[in-house]
Image (cartoon, coloured by chain):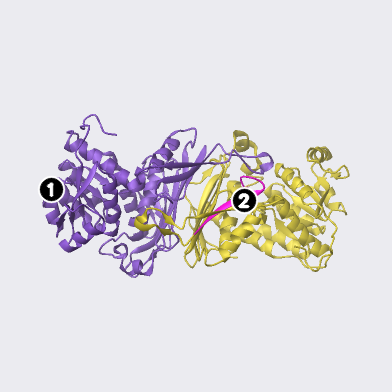
Chain colours: A purple, B yellow
């Protein structure tokens, strides 16, 4: 995967983990698994004690530098890149600060509260020549690449016409009262930013990132007393007639569906964000499906595929990010714009859905 | 399954098949398989020659009486019940005529062009003490009963909150130009009446036939030049916050999904109308699904179930219809009202969706 511009045995990308959120534990492990491409060299938290505890709990090397503030982490000259899992409301401040210090940015999703904030982050990364990527792990599973292949092979799926996606998990009482994702000052997008992000991304992925023409939110979203979304959905419409619907919720059983229906075939995946098992990802494809004689069955039947992976998807994500950083740091390459572009489209659609909800489920045009 | 009121070895229900549509071939086979509960004793068509050809092609007994008109079939005193697969626009005329002649009515779906027409049919059946049932075969698969059990067991699925259903098949050019389902004078409901019927039924089934409060059709339905629907969908809303979405199409690959997401669990079935194989029906259930430590997988994983059946679902449907007819004919029972009630609710929702489409995708209240 290394480009011609990068040396054969590139130095590891030295990560600073900026904030000790629960999800950072998963990323710390991913960075260890992504060695030698990645190395965790520093942890920054609001207190050095928290950083120390995090490093110890997550098996980070004894040499890991512990910083008692985010500023101190960004001042660390031996940090190439930061992973930033802070509450969404802090993203624009700290991601732009990281970029300004020349740190590459791996940013947890949702990337920003609105596209304008994201644009500030992306502009800062561009100006400082640092790579931006959002931390949407499933994009990096080899299953996703395999499904992409099938979607691109026109004989298998044909023209995509209808997409459904659901992502829900049933949050417990503690989450519903205390998690940052239900707090208006921390993650004001609530479930839309958290679970809805994945549904929107999956839908855009299925149509090769063609933005819809307009979106209309589903009525009757569920909000908590502070007005933060706990369950919602939307329908997305494209000018050529493609239609997608998604629903996301903190209130129903763990469900992770993407169904893509095309003129020639149908793709089903029911664990798209986090595969049932870490080292394998199943999906099923039906193509040119017909009724059997007298409509007593299907010919052919859908086929089931399983794509295995030695490294979990989050480690592959870290490796892909490292590859881009190494090409910039060591190979003189410019920043790669595919991933920031995908992030931005996801955010744009999320903004439109939020606007539709806020304005009473009206149709909202999607403009880039 | 026979009730106390019926004799132990009831005489077969003597069917007249009223119209030689393609689907009637499947039902003729089902009636043969449903022996000794059922017997095909007559076929009525617009010509005796067509009736003769149908009887020969479908292995009906040499004693089958062949009628050259629907009237003649209805005048046949040795016909207990008719199966009526005529174009929808003819249902109200011929189903009421059948009821008036004391024939029990197994009616192909969609049952009518509108609820008022269906009500005329149901009233005729009531007045004449004949059983009514629509021919929605999947309702009678033992898989459906098994899934119902799981939906009713509150610990497995909990409160149903979100339902998605898709039914599409890719019609060929001949179908799109010549099938009765694309002709405004024959099946004016188009894909909504044909494929949408199943989606609406599945959604109502999932909520134990509680009618939604309102429906809003999806925008951008596809119509043919005559204005008949070829692809459409809708969102259904219940007062308590349940939401269902469906999409139906003649233009995309064969797809038959129902996904039911509850507070405790999730049900997936991807061949709900016609199982992949005639003698078995698969589905999967996830219950109390959690993320594995560090969100690296699912604990527990969904479980896959397969329900087998000796007889295909359409034969089981015929047997159920025969059981009710025998209880009336031989046991002095009154007509059974569960099946007509389910039919009526399906039709009511379909009407509301059609109105929403016709009126520009507005919200339409659902009233019984």
Residue B66, picture quadrant? top right
Q: Is residue B238 above or below residue A23?
A: below
Give the residues in magenta: B273-286
Q: x, y percentage for residue A287? A: 53, 37
Q: Residue at x 85, y 58 (%)?
A: B11
Q: Is residue B240 magenta?
A: no
Q: Which residue is mark 1?
A: A101
Q: For numbered disc 1, what is the local secondary structure?
A: loop
Q: Is residue B250 above or below residue B367?
A: above
Q: Residue at x 33, y 61 (%)?
A: A190
Q: For numbered disc 2, what is the local secondary structure?
A: strand
Specify whether A106 is left or right of A268.
left
Seen from the viewer's position, the closer of residues A181 and B74 is A181
Seen from the viewer's position, the closer of residues A260 and A279 is A279
Q: x, y percentage for residue B187? A: 64, 46
Quarter that holds the N terminus of chain B: bottom right
- Label 2 marks a residue whose chain is B
Q: Residue at x 14, y 52 (%)?
A: A74
Q: Which residue is mark 2?
A: B281
């Amino acid at each position: 995967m290394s480009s011609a511009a990068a040396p054969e045995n590139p130095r590891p990308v030295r990560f600073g983990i900026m904030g000790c959120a629960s999800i950072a534990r998963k990323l710390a492990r991913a960075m260890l698994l992504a060695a030698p491409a990645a190395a965790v060299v520093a942890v920054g938290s609001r207190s050095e004690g928290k950083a120390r505890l995090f490093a110890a709990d997550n098996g980070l090397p004894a040499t890991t530098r512990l910083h008692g503030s985010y500023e101190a982490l960004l001042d660390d000259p031996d940090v190439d890149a930061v992973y930033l899992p802070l509450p969404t409301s802090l993203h624009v401040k700290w991601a732009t600060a990281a970029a300004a210090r020349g740190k590459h940015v791996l940013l947890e999703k949702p990337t920003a509260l609105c596209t304008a904030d994201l644009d500030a982050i992306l502009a800062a990364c561009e100006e400082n020549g640092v790579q931006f990527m959002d931390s949407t792990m499933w994009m990096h599973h080899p299953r996703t690449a395999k499904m992409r292949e099938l979607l691109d092979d026109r004989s298998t799926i044909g023209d995509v016409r209808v997409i459904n996606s659901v992502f829900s998990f049933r949050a417990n009482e503690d989450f519903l009262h205390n998690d940052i994702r239900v707090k208006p000052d921390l993650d004001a997008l609530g479930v839309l930013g958290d679970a809805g992000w994945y549904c929107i991304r999956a839908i855009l992925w299925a149509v090769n990132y063609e933005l819809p023409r307009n979106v209309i939110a589903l009525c009757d979203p569920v909000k908590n007393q502070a007005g933060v979304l706990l369950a919602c959905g939307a329908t997305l419409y494209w000018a050529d007639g493609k239609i997608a619907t998604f629903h996301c919720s903190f209130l129903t059983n763990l469900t992770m569906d993407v169904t893509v229906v095309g003129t020639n075939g149908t793709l089903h995946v029911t664990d798209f964000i986090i595969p049932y098992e870490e080292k394998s990802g199943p999906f099923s494809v039906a193509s040119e499906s017909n009724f059997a004689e007298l409509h007593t069955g299907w010919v052919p039947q859908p086929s089931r595929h399983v794509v295995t992976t030695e490294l979990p998807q989050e480690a592959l994500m870290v490796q892909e990010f490292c590859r881009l950083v190494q090409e910039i740091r060591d190979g003189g390459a410019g920043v790669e714009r595919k991933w920031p572009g995908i992030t931005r489209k996801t955010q744009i659609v999320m903004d439109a859905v939020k606007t539709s909800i806020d304005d009473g489920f009206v149709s909202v045009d999607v403009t880039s």
